[in-house]
Every structure is written in C-alpha cells, then in structure tokens.
Image (cartoon, grey):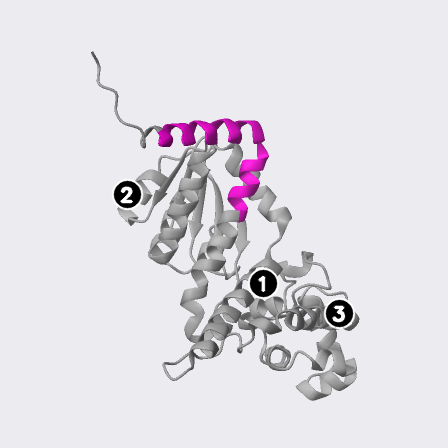
Amino acid sequence: MEQPSPVAAFPADFGLRARLQAVTPHLTQRMASLAELLLDRPELAVMLSSSDLAARAGVSPPTLTRFCKLLGYGGFVQLRIGAAADAGRSAGQESLTGEPGAMVHPGMDDRELLRTFLATHVQALQASADLTNLDVMREAAALVAAADRVDVYGVGGSGSVADGLVERLYQVGINARGWSDLHLGVMSACRLDPGCVAIGVSSSGITRETVEMLTVAGETGARTIAITSDHRSPLAQAAEVVIRTAPLDDYRDLGELTASHTQVFAADLLYLLVSWHDRARSAEQAGKARAAVARLGRPVRRSR
C-alpha cells in the first residue's frame, strides 16, 4: 500500500502539479497512470466527476480516493480545488506562455525562445514554492541560527549554490564554511559535534560526494539538513530535515538550467529565515561586514 506523502501538510487548494511531479516516480503502475493523465490534462480533474475520471484513467474509484490522500488531499473535491488553483495561476501568466518545459531548439524565433525559456523557469520556481513547507524551513532556520558552526556541502552546480548560502550566512554572523572536495569535506565533517549543523545540497539527491559528507557529519551527532528535489533520495535519507525543491522531470532539456534557480530559491529562503531568527545580531553583523568591505574602496592611509 502507498505510504502517506510528506506533501500532505500543504493546503488542499495549492500546487497540484508540483505534488504530482514529486510523487509520480514512487507510485504503483496504476496510480502512476492516473498521475500522468493529470499532468498531461489537469483540466480533467475539474471537468469530470470522480467516477468518470477514475474510468478515464483505468482505475477504480477507491484507488482514486487513495491517490487523492497520497497527494495530501482529503478527497476528490480538494484535489479538484487544487487543479482549479493551478489553472488560475496559469491563466494569470498568459503573457509568459510558450509551453513550459517545451524542447528549445535553434529553429525557434526569438520571441518563442524567450517566452518558453521564461515560462519554464517561472513554472519551476512556482513548483518549488508549492513544495515549500514553511514549518520545515523554520525548523531548519532555527537549527542554523543556534549552531556553533555550519558546514555546507555541494558539488558542481550545487556547489555554487552551497557557496552562495555560505556567503550569506557568514554576512549575518553564522560561522559557516562550504566544502565541495570530498576529502576536505569529510575531514571537516568528522570534526563536527551535536552543537553543529551540516547542510547537503544536491538537486538529484544522489551525488555521492555530498551524501558521504552529510553522512559523516550525521555520525558525529551534528544536526543534518538536505536541500533536494527527491525526498526519498540517499541525501534525504541521511538528513533529519529535508527542504524540497522542484523535481526536474517535467522540464526536459531546460531541467539542468532550472535546477540552480530552484536550489537558490530554497537556499535564499532559508537564509532569510535564519537572519530573522535573531534580527539584532543579524543587523549588527551585516553592518560590520558592510563597513569592513566599504573600507576596501578607500585609499590606504600611510603611517607617519
């Protein structure tokens, strides 16, 4: 039997498409066919009755009910509301259209290329917002704000996101360090303790180096956080707290490009909540950082 999904904590009228993308890789064949139907034609959830939709997907009405609950909805009515909410957002973004996630190619005219490129990125960010659980974000922010030291691990493109998060946290007084080299990362991780926090960043959640570094950090008793699109990935399994980003499956050849934006979305939101956790400290430390950097633009005084 399908296990309850973590997206169950989200409002019933928000983010059907993102929920479908998140659970589809883990569904049984019958439920997957229902998910694929709704991803392809989400308007059917609004147009058809529950029995007609079940028949269209080739599943039984009880299977449709279980499917709704797996997505975090109380039943079909709530799923229908979620589909309508997504349709409303799409209608409000008509100026962006181009097909989100469409294949781009050199034969596109300039306008079509820009519209498709923009629509795909907007949809990816919207999906990340739909998957964001602010209670989880606040839990992660509280851990980071109270930590004696924070290690952030990431490799490749995720390494750039990790470095950006380290820089922001450092500006507000968090003792943060970033690691992308496996050997240096595990040396740092093994020296953490229960007063420290480790964050692993990987869109796929299967990057071996990042998983290994976070695993070693967890073995020391440090609190662990993952930023990933797959809540069942090895990285997520190695973490106590999982911050989810949009899955890439729906974005075709632009998926790798949208991944960095959805990761930055999550990392920046985490930073913002950390900075709010102790506003006085954050303001003081940020002021010191600005003043120190500002000195670099002034001539050096010579001693007499």
Q: Position of residue 140 (x, y in %)?
A: 55, 43
State whether the magenta stretch is mostly helix, strand or loop: helix
Q: Which residues are magenta?
A: 269-294
The residue pinned by badge 3 equals 81
The mark nearer the N terminus, 1 or 3, is: 3
Residue neighbourhood size for the residue with mark 2, other residues' Cα within 10 Å, grouped as few (<14), some (14–19), many (≥20): few
The mark nearer the N terminus, 2 or 1, is: 1
The residue pinned by badge 1 equals 126
Determine which quarter of the picture holds residue 176: top left
Magenta highlight on residue 288:
yes
The residue pinned by badge 2 equals 184
Above or below: residue 174 compared with residue 123: above
Residue drawn at the location 36% of the way across and 32% of the way down: 293
Secondary structure at numbered mark 1: helix
Residue drawn at the location 22% of the way across and 18% of the way down: 302
CA–CA distance between discs 1 and 3? Answer: 17 Å
Q: Quadrant of the N terminus?
A: bottom right
Q: Position of residue 93 (x, y in %)?
A: 62, 70
Q: Position of residue 38 (x, y in %)?
A: 64, 79
Q: Amino acid at mark 1?
A: Gln
